Amino acid sequence: MEQLFVVKIGGNVIDAGDALKAFLHDFAQVPGKKILVHGGGKIATAFGERLGIEPNYINGRRITDDATLELVTMVYGGLINKKIVAALQSEGCNAIGLSGADGNVVPAAKRPVEGTDFGWVGDIKESMGTSTLELLLDNDLIPVLAPLTHDGTGQLLNTNADTIASAVAVALSKQYTVRLVYCFEKKGVLENVADNDSVISLITKEKYESLLQENKLFEGILPKIDNAFAAIGKGVSEVLIGDAKDLLQNTGSTVKGTLFK
């Protein structure tokens, strides 16, 4: 099958203009079919403060009330998404920006209330289709997905970008050989969070369980690892977590960072 790269960019790279510009320059050079998924939480928080919308988190997860949904729709689906698309166009990369509602790319359902009401947060449906993404890819367009989904009844939903990247990679793994690449400001999964060179090059399920028991993983990386194994278990050939600066190497034959198999 043909190779497809699903790349997620987030962390501090989104907030840093020069770092994001360098990453997008590299992304434009990645050969073949590719999809970019982006986050942008810190920018939304900064804009919210200017508008008097205070962020509310429980266990590190944003509560999305009515005002916050309007905020993230403007920032994620508008400002960040379109700035990324414009930057890629300047690099000769024919990108097209999408939310999950556009072309029904990522349908979701409002997260059920189980102890905590997260508000307008969406959980992606298992029955996610791929026809729109395949159409775009077949016509040499590069989808750039904002972390917004919809419930099919007109309601937009806020959805974690890591989860969107994993779900898109899984859905397209029936048509392509997919490598899912999570890019942020670290070199990979670190055995010692204070040592940026303590990268774990390969993590299997067994290795993961061992690291958890030894408390060697910082909490912020756990959702990415969970999404990595979820993708591997559902047909994605490889998942890699690494530094945004290493994107070209991590979409080539030799990789840096942490590989999941």
Image: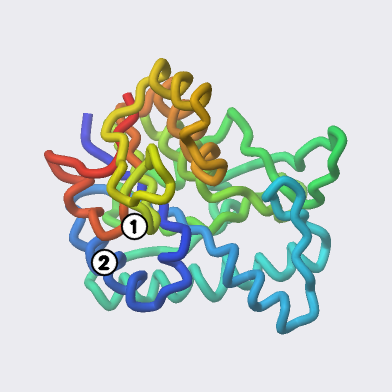
Residue 137 drawn at (x, y percent): 32, 49
Amino acid bearing label 1: Ile
Q: Please identify the quarter of the rendering in which residue 37 is found.
A: bottom left
* Of the pair 65 and 155, the residue shown nearer to us: 65
* Of the pair 257 and 144, the residue shown nearer to us: 257
Q: Residue at x 45, y 20 (%)?
A: 210
Element at label 2? loop
Element at label 1? strand
What mark, if any, has residue 46 been given in the picture? none
- 191 is higher (above) or lower (below) than 94: above
Quadrant containing the C terminus is: top left
Label 1 close to label 2 by CB (< 8 Å): yes
* Residue at the extreme bottom of the image, as rendered: 50
Amino acid bearing label 2: Cys
Q: How is the image coloured?
A: rainbow
* Of the pair 202 and 52, the residue shown nearer to us: 202
- 142 with respect to 218 (left or right): left
Of the two numbered discs 1 and 2 on the same chain, state the one appearing first in sequence. Answer: 2
Q: Is residue 101 visible?
A: yes
Residue 90 drawn at (x, y percent): 27, 78
* Residue at the extreme top of the image, as rendered: 206
Q: Which residue is mark 1?
A: 142
Q: Which residue is mark 2?
A: 93
The span from disc 1 to disc 2 (Cα, nearest Å) is 7 Å
Q: Is residue 143 visible?
A: no
- 118 with respect to 37 (left or right): right
Q: Residue at x 28, y 43 (%)?
A: 257
Q: Residue at x 38, y 41 (%)?
A: 189
- 58 is higher (above) or lower (below) than 27: above
Task: Give the class, few, some or many, for how many residues have Cα within 10 Å of label 1's Cα (few <14, many ≥20).
Answer: many
Q: Residue at x 34, y 29 (%)?
A: 260
- 149 with respect to 233 (left or right): right
